[in-house]
Amino acid sequence: MKIQNLDSFQGDRRLPASRTGKRLLDLVLGHEQERPPVWIMRQAGRYLPEYRALRQTAGSFLDLCYTPELAAEVTLQPLRRFPLDAAILFSDILVVPDAMGRTVRFEQGEGPRLEPIRPEDVANLKGEEGLAHLAPVFETVRLVRAGLSPEKTLIGFCGSPWTVATYMIAGRGTTDQGPARLFALQHPEAFAALIDRLVDFSIAYLVEQFRAGCDVVQLFESWAMNLDEVAFAERVIAPNRRIVEGVRAAIPGAPIIGFPRGAAGLVARYVEETGVDMVGLDYGMPVDFANTALPASVGVQGNLDPLRVVVGGEQMRERARSIIAGFSGRRHIFNLGHGIVPETPIAHVEELINLVHNG
Ligand SMILES: Cc1c2[nH]c(c1CCC(=O)O)Cc1[nH]c(c(CCC(=O)O)c1C)Cc1[nH]c(c(CCC(=O)O)c1C)Cc1[nH]c(c(C)c1CCC(=O)O)C2
């Protein structure tokens, strides 16, 4: 299969690949830009009336994810409204456990519900043969690529193994990831096997996303907090590093953004030991701390509090400007520090993106 868009990527990270003309991708590859590229975490979704309208007609949330024409349309919706530099594939991190044979449902207004995995279930998870279930996702990538202007970057993604495991083990989102933290300590062998399965599946999944036409992928480690440093090294750093290495073994120099939400004082170790090209920062990460902890060569993405965009006005503009000024000495993709929320007024998003473009 032909690998699209990757002709100019180089395995040697010390030499930036030649420019591609895509502002966000070029920044990830090491080429400075005159303004930060911008996208909005969870930019396709319920704050957009056109998403809510389409969602009504599409059946379940997973049906929407697995219907390429509709998923491609939803991916492109935010780019029709706003001058964003990137589209992010419309899908979900929980399509992976679905493809591995677990039961996954999304209850309206309640979030995801899975059948909690038991230690004895791990051996029955589907491996790469489960990837066929995600063929509609790769078709979505091809459709989006075809409908996207050449200067826009297409971002693919997966959930990082620990984060996906927290949902598989608890069967839902949790505030402190208690069930998964207990499982890891009480059933270390089954837990290690679960992480291994997720690492292998995620590598194959991301490689296929690149082959279908994604330019960059993001690893969502949304639950990197609440771990001691030993658990963080084992459950966050090691699996993310294996994914980075595994994807780059298939696609030399593949551009990867890591988002270890809540990594706090461990963020520099995360970047150094995983080998990601850029790191997403949550809104709790102080700009000055990041600048001190991370070498100037490390690019960052973030990190406005999404609720500042709900309220808008001067407090939003002031904070956005200070983030942009604070990260002006390094590569910076402007983004929120977590996902945009459904209550966000469209006009505030417009104003925010305009500010990133024009100061
Ligand atoms: C933890 C996580 C999930 N999914 C995701 C994460 C990591 C990012 C983060 O930390 O927020 C990632 C995700 N989920 C979705 C995308 C699509 C692309 C985009 O960012 O626009 C992406 C990148 C669509 C979605 N995923 C979901 C929706 C809403 C479903 C609906 O329309 O009914 C969307 C648009 C559902 C979902 N999916 C998940 C939860 C907890 C929920 C329910 C809460 C919520 O609604 O935000 C799991």
Image (cartoon, grey):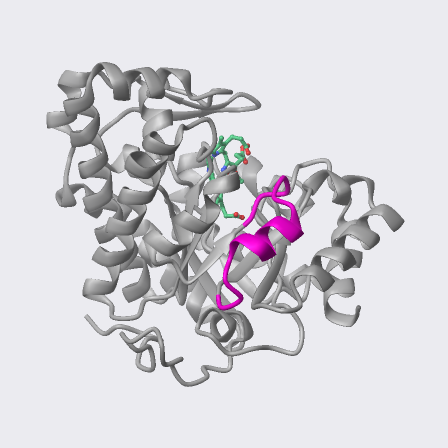
Residue 104 seen in render: no
Residue 269 seen in render: yes
Q: Which residue is at a point 54% across and 64% down the rendered structure image?
A: 86
Q: Residue furthest front?
A: 292
Q: Which residue is at a point 31% across and 47% down the rendered structure image?
A: 240
Q: Which residue is at a point 38% across and 65% down the rendered structure image?
A: 255
* 13 versus 162 height, above or below: below
What percent of the width, then of the height, locates residue 164? 35, 33
Magenta highlight on residue 291? yes
In this view, the residue in front, 346 or 18, is 18
Q: Which residues are magenta?
A: 281-297
123 lies left or right of 115? left
Of the 4 image quadrants, the one containing the C terminus is bottom right
Q: Residue furthest left?
A: 123
Q: Residue furthest right?
A: 314
In this view, the residue in front, 3 or 191, is 191
What percent of the width, then of the height, locates residue 279? 48, 55
In this view, the residue in front, 104 or 324, is 324
Of the 4 image quadrants, the one containing the N terminus is bottom left
121 lies left or right of 330? left
78 lies left or right of 272? right
76 lies left or right of 143? right
What percent of the width, then of the height, locates residue 123? 11, 26
- Which quadrant of the structure image shows residue 185? top left
What percent of the width, then of the height, locates residue 97? 29, 33
Q: Which residue is at a point 60% across and 53% down the rendered structure image?
A: 302
- Which quadrant of the structure image shows residue 13? bottom left
Magenta highlight on residue 220? no
